[in-house]
Image (spheres, rainbow, N blue to C red):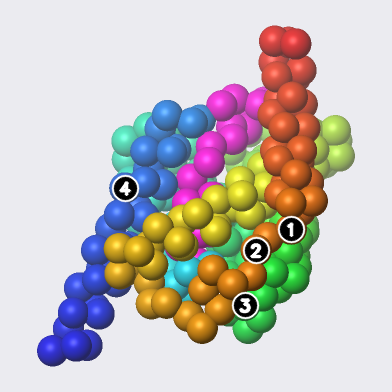
Amino acid sequence: MQKSKENIKKLTMTAMLCALAYIALVIGRVPVVLFLKYDPKDVIITLGGLIWGPMTSFVVSVIVSVIEMVTVSDTGFIGLVMNIISTCSFACTAALIYKKKRTLSGAVIALLVGSIAMTAVMILWNYLVTPLYMHVPRETVKELLIPAFLPFNLLKAGLNAGFTFLLYRPVISALRKTGYVAESENSGKKKVPVGMLIAAGLLVITCVLFVLSLKGII
């Protein structure tokens, strides 16, 4: 009976994560450069992975990417594959590391490594797959890797990491109050240093200002 309740609870949370990630995708999608767009769905998916493990991030990523493909995306199957790879390289990597080291330093390391992993992986996959999508020679895409794809992925990683770090504590505190996450012995005892919160906030602000400058808004 207890196991059945836990399964229902996990299924409910997975469905809620999918819904929230899709809403974030639809209302938060911002064109940045070329055909590349940023949306905050990875933040929701990463939060789910940090709380419930990397498999949650993977499942939600696949479901949301499929829904995106058949509703709002115009990139077809190629876009589906690239979305899943991009999200999982960040969210699953961060969730896997944090699962092994559930501390503040572990969270910082997890988000940093996730950012590096996503940037490196997407540079490779952009080089391999983007020529098929853009219908251009691979040499053309190669010339865009440093001036376009690298800054975009660093920007995306910075926003994902900053938002995730800022939201994790209030989200998990709310989930503990509602009973969706069990209380731990250290719940509420360790506070995140204000300096780290400020640093995460500045990272987000810097990335947002960079996007606004690219769009010619400021």
| Element type where label 2 sits in the image | loop
First reached walking from the N terminus: tag 4 or tag 3: 4
Q: In 3D space, how far apart are the residues under numbered discs 2 and 4 (Cα atoms)?
A: 30 Å
Is 217 a magenta residue?
A: no
Residue that mark 2 sits on: 191
Residue 89: horizontal and vertical position, in percent?
Answer: 62, 62
Disc 4 crowd rating (10 Å Cα; few below 14, some 14-19, many 20+) is some
Instruction: Tell us which disc is closer to us: 4 or 1.
Output: 1
Q: In 3D space, how far apart are the residues under numbered discs 4 and 3 (Cα atoms)?
A: 26 Å
Disc 3 crowd rating (10 Å Cα; few below 14, some 14-19, many 20+) is some
Residue that mark 4 sits on: 19
Residue that mark 1 sits on: 193
Q: In 3D space, how far apart are the residues under numbered discs 1 and 3 (Cα atoms)?
A: 16 Å
| Element type where label 4 sits in the image | helix
Instruction: Tell us which disc is closer to us: 2 or 4.
Output: 2
| Element type where label 1 sits in the image | loop
Q: Which residue is drawn at 56% across and 27% down?
A: 30
Whether tag 1 and tag 2 are in contact, CB under 8 A, the answer is yes
Residue that mark 3 sits on: 102
Residue 141 vs 217, above or below: the answer is: below
Q: Which amino acid does label 3 sit on?
A: Arg
Q: In 3D space, how far apart are the residues under numbered discs 3 and 2 (Cα atoms)?
A: 14 Å
Q: In 3D space, how far apart are the residues under numbered discs 4 and 1 (Cα atoms)?
A: 32 Å
